Amino acid sequence: MSDPPATETRADWVRRPTTAFLWWWLPLCIGFAASFFALSPRTIAFVWMVLFAWMGTGCLLNAYHCRRVHCYISGPALVLGAVTAGLFGAGVLSLGPHSLNNIVGTTLGVALLSFVPEILWRKYA
């Protein structure tokens, strides 16, 4: 495997501590912290909706800037998670007694699994 061009590596927000923190780590911390407050499941769903939309936007912009494979997969997955969390929060969607946990877990699981193609193939398309 050859190394990616320097321009792709420099443009990759995941590799920059400040942008990675603002686009992905801080929203994750806020989302997990929301679970510890006495908020209704609908409110927590709307919190995750905003956070997933934020993280998905970051991934899609990062995919556009540096063509990172992970971001091509996780961006749409996070946006879909935002839509699903929003539908649950609005009372339109119910996926059983643990709906919100299933939505958040599945969304984050897919985002985490989207690193596998980078391991098996390469980081940049």
Image: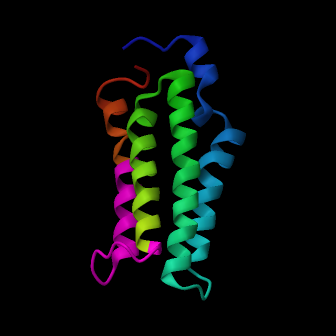
Query: Magenta stretch containing residue 102, yes or no?
Result: yes
Q: Tell me if 55 is positioned left or right of 106 in this view.
A: right
- Vertical comparison of 83 with 41: above or below: above
- Image quarter where the N terminus lies is top left
For the point 56% across and 31% down, the residue is 62
For the point 54% across and 52% down, the residue is 53
Question: 52 or 8: which is nearer to us?
Answer: 52
- Vertical comparison of 8 with 104: above or below: above
Q: How is the image coloured?
A: rainbow
Q: Residue furthest right?
A: 18
For the point 41% across and 67% down, the residue is 87
Q: Quadrant of residue 114?
A: top left
For the point 41% across and 11% down, the residue is 2
Question: 57 or 29: which is nearer to us?
Answer: 57
Q: Residue furthest bottom?
A: 38
Q: Main secondary structure of the magenta part?
A: helix
- Vertical comparison of 121 with 17: above or below: above
Residue 43 is situated, as x and y percent measured from the top left of the image, at: 56, 77
Residue 91 is situated, as x and y percent measured from the top left of the image, at: 41, 77
Residue 18 is situated, as x and y percent measured from the top left of the image, at: 72, 41
Q: Tell me if 7 is positioned left or right of 107 in this view.
A: right
| Number of numbered discs on residues | 0
Query: Magenta stretch containing residue 119, yes or no?
Result: no
Looking at the rendering, the stretch of residues picked out in magenta corresponds to 89-111
- Image quarter where the C terminus lies is top left
